Image: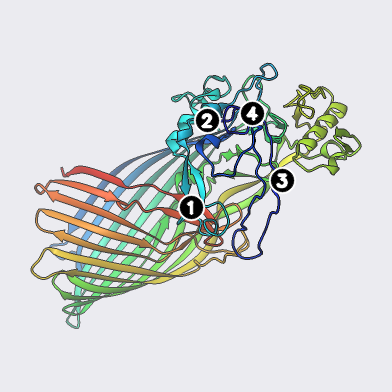
Amino acid sequence: DGQSFDNGNPYNQWAELTNLRFIANNTIPDWIPTTSVGFQGFPRTVRDLEGVDMTSTTAHLRYNNKESNLTQYQIKGDWQNINGFLSDKLVSVQFGLSSIDQKFDRTLRSNTLFAPIQDGAAPGSLIWGPNFWNDDAFTLTSLAGLLGDSSDGLSVPYYMHIDFDDAVAGYSQGYWVNSPTWNCSEGFPNCYGSPQDVATVKESTDSAYIQLNFEGEYNMMPWKLVTSLRYEELMLNAPQNYNIPTGTFIGTYGWGDGPYFIFGPTQNGEMPLRNVSGSYSSKSEMVLPSFAFSIAPSENTVLRLSAGKTIARSGLEKFSPNVVFPQFLSMNNPVHVNTSGNPDLEPLVSNNIDLAFEYYYAEGSYAAVNIFQKDLKDFPGNSTSRVTYDGLYDVRYGVNGAGPADTSTVVLNWPNYQTIDQVAFGSMDWWQTLMKIYHATVPGTSCTLDQRTWSDYFYYNSTECVQSSPSINPLMQFDVNRPENIYSGKLDGVEIALQHFFVNTNFGFIFNYTFINGDTEASPTAVRNESFELAGFGDSGNISVFYEDEKFSARLSNNYRAETYVGFDEYNPLWVEARSQVDFSASYRVNDDVSLFVEGLNITDSEVRLYARYDNMLFLAQNHGPVYKAGFRVKF
C-alpha cells in the first residue's frame, strides 16, 4: 500500500544484492539475493511476496476507441439465354452495380499517472494513490506452465497477479480521483488525458460487374466456362488534424525515484501544442478480369482451371495522414518512434492461377487437391524516415558545447565534485547537474538550487525547471513509421480436402489442409528493412463434424493455424505460435424465408501468443475469450 504502516516502500530505501550469479548458457539468468533487509526499520525474514507488499506510483493508461460504419446499395440482374441468343453455349449472364460508403473514426488517449510524495502541498505531506489499493487484489500465482525458462531452476517461480477490473478500480480512487490533474473517477475520461489523436477516414467504392456462363461438351466430356469482368472506382478522403508537442522536460517527484522525461511541461493543466491540419483525397480505378473452366473426364471426376486478378485494400485506419507521437518517452532512447498512415496507399494486387482435381466417390462425398500460385505486388510494408519538428527540442542533449554537453559547470554530488560527463546519464546526479547548468546559463529559467528539507539533501524544490530551450538543445529526432507499397512476392501451395457423408445417416465430416510455400519464411536474425518476407501467410487446416437434415443443421469445427510469421515490431521479427480454435454453429429452418441460428466461437477459450525472434522471447499473449451469437434470418 505504500505507507509506513504497511509493507510497501514509500521512503525509497534499498537493499544490497550480494553474490549475484550469472550462468553463461542459452537460458534466462537465474539470480539469488543472499542478504535480507527489513524496509520499515525492523528485522524481516525472507518470505514470499504478499498483496500487502505491492505498491505502484506510476501507471500507463491507454484508451483506443475505434468505430467503423458501412452503407451499401446493390442492384443485381440475371438473364437466362433461353433462345440461344449469340451462342447456344451461352447459358446466362449475371450483372450488377454496387455503391459502398465507409467511414472510420478513431480517438486515442494515453496518459501517465504519477503518485508523488508531494504535489504542491507543504513539505512532509505524503500523498500516495496506491495507499487506497485493496491488498486482496493481488494474488500470488505460480509460473508453472508459463515462461519455461523462468519457472524452473533458482529464479522466482511466481508472479503477483491482478485482474484488469481490480486495476481499473485501484486507479479510480485514492489520490487520482479528486486531483484536478487526473480526475480518475469512473465515468470521467480525464484519467486518460486529452485526446492524443482523433482520426477520420472516408472511402467510397463504386463498382460494376458482368459475368458470362457457358456450357458444352468436348469428346463426350461436359465442360463449363465462367468469365467475368469487374470495374471498381475508389475515392478516398482523409482529413489531417494532429498536434505536435512544443517542448520536453525532465522532472522528478522524489530523491531515489529517478528523473522522468516527458513532453511538456503543462501550462494551466494543458500541454502547449502546435496544430497541423489539412486534407488528402484521391481517386483510383481498377479493372479485374477472371475466368474459371471445368471439365469432367468421367462421371465422378472433375478438372478445374482458373485465373484472375484480385485486389485487397488495407484497413481504413492505415490511410489516416495524422502523425501519432508516443505518450511514454524513454530517457535512454535517443530516437523515438512516431506512427502515421498513408493516404496514397494503393491496393495489394494479386494475379492468381489454380489447378484442381476432384473425385466424387459417393453421394455427397468427395476428395480434392488444388495447386495454386499467387503473384503479389504493391504489398504494404513499413517505411521509416528520420525527421525533426520545428520548435520541438530535446532537453536531454546539448548543441555547440552548451546544455548537457557543457562540462565546465560542477555541482556538489557528495562526496565528489563532478561534471555532467562524470555522472550516469539519466541519474539523479545528472538531473541535478542539468539544474545547475540551467541556473547558470539559461536566461529566465525557474531552476533554483534550494533544497527542500534537511532530510532531502539531494532533493531540490525546482522539480520541473529543466525544460527544453532552443539556446542549448537540438531538435528532437523521431523515426516515423508509415505503410508503403514497397514489396512484391510469390506464394504457392497445395490444398487437400475431404468430405464424407456416412451412409444412411445425416452425419458427416469435412477435412481440409493448406500447405503454403513462397516468400513467407523469416529468419530469427532478420533486421528490419534489410530483408523481405510476406507476413501473415502460414499453413492452416480444419476438421468438422456435422449433422444436416431438411430442418436442422449443426457443425462442430476445430480450426488450426500453424506457426506464422506476422511482421516486425519496432526492432524484432514476430511469429504467432501454432494454435487451435474450436467453433460451434447450429441453425433451424422454420420455413423457406425464416431461420434461427446460434453460434459459438472459440468455445475452448484458446489463447493467441506471439514471440519475437525465438520462442522463449514472449512478445504478447492475448485471451479474447469465447464469443456467442444467437439470432434469426429473414428473407424478403
Q: Quadrant of residue 402?
A: top right
Q: CA distance from mark 1 to mark 2?
A: 32 Å
- Kind of residue sitting beneath label 4: Leu
Q: Which mark is residue 192?
A: 2
**Residue found 77% across the figure and 21% down from its top:** 453
Number of other residues with Cα within 10 Å of mark 2, as a class: few under 14, some 14 to 19, many 20 or more: many
How dense is the environment of label 4, judged by Cα within 10 Å: few (below 14), some, or many (20 and up)? some
Q: Given the image, on which type of amino acid does mark 3 rest?
A: Pro
Crowd class of label 3 (few under 14; some 14 to 19; many from 20; radius 10 Å): few
Marks 1, 3: nearer the viewer = 1
Residue 130 relative to residue 223: left or right: right
Asked whether the viewer can see residue 240, the reply is no
Report, in whole angstroms, how far the alpha carbon at label 2 lies from the one at label 4.
17 Å
If you read the primary sequence from the N terminus, does the residue marked by circle 3 or circle 2 appear first? 2
Mark seen at residue 273: 4
Circle 1 Cα neighbour tier, 10 Å, few/some/many (<14 / 14–19 / ≥20): some
- As drawn, the label of residue 634 is none
Q: Amino acid at mark 2?
A: Tyr
Q: Which three-letter amino acid code belongs to the residue tagged 1?
A: Leu
Residue 365 visible in image: yes
Lower sequence index among marks 1 and 2: 1
Q: CA distance from mark 4 to mark 3?
A: 22 Å
Q: Secondary structure at mark 4?
A: strand
Mark 2 secondary-structure assignment: helix
